[in-house]
Image: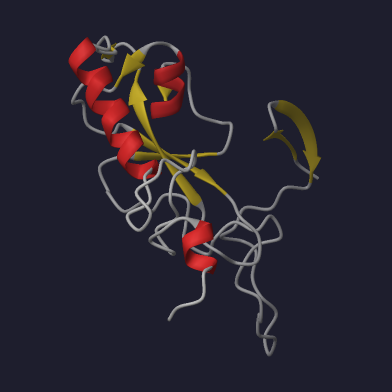
Amino acid sequence: MTYAATRILGRVIPALSVVPRAEHQQPAGLTRLNTSTTSGFSPRPLSESANPLVSVYRWRLAPDGLATRRQLRALGLRPGGQDVVAELHRPRRRGRGPLVAYLYRVEHARPVRPMTPGRAAALAAAMRARRTCPTCRTDVGYCIPRSLGMCVPCHDLPQS
């Protein structure tokens, strides 16, 4: 019986009789119907990524010093033109492929550019245009759904 430590959700849990994958064989005559694992991780191997030059980490197991774009933004930083260093794969259910988050080095990140008055005015104008119905020309107070192309009251009016 061999002992090994398995890292699950940040905790080290001892595991009994861990058998390496090379030694584990499917019994003859049996076929596997479900290609996904019990955790819902995709059948694509963990070492595979769309870009072969980046490392791939499982969910919550990325090393310190790497962060996603949202994590950088929360720190007041941006990637600043640097390339993706690694990918973080989060498993999903029912054999679907994993959600992929790109990781960047925190030490190479740059500060977020400050909001200038010109950029603020342009952003306000763009949001006002998204809230303005093209049919009735009123600011409806919410972004017009692209599926409708107009505000809900104009869409619900009977067509003549």
Horizontally, residue 43 falls left or right of residue 87, namely: right
Quadrant where the image shows the N terminus: top right
In front of the other: 72 or 136: 136
Q: What kind of colouring is applied to the model shown? A: secondary structure
Residue at (18% x, 16% y) in the render:
118
Residue 78 spot, x, y in % from top left: 30, 19
**27 is higher (above) or lower (below) than 17:** below
Q: Residue furthest bottom?
A: 29
In front of the other: 71 or 24: 71
Residue at (18% x, 26% y) in the render:
81
Residue 30 spot, x, y in % from top left: 70, 86
Quadrant where the image shows the C terminus: bottom left
Residue 74 spot, x, y in % from top left: 46, 16
Q: Which residue lies furthest to the front in this view?
A: 160
Residue at (50% x, 45% y) in the render:
89
Horizontally, residue 53 falls left or right of residue 46, namely: left
In front of the other: 149 or 89: 149
Residue 19 spot, x, y in % from top left: 69, 53
**29 is higher (above) or lower (below) than 23:** below
**22 is higher (above) or lower (below) than 105:** below
Residue at (22% x, 11% y) in the render:
117
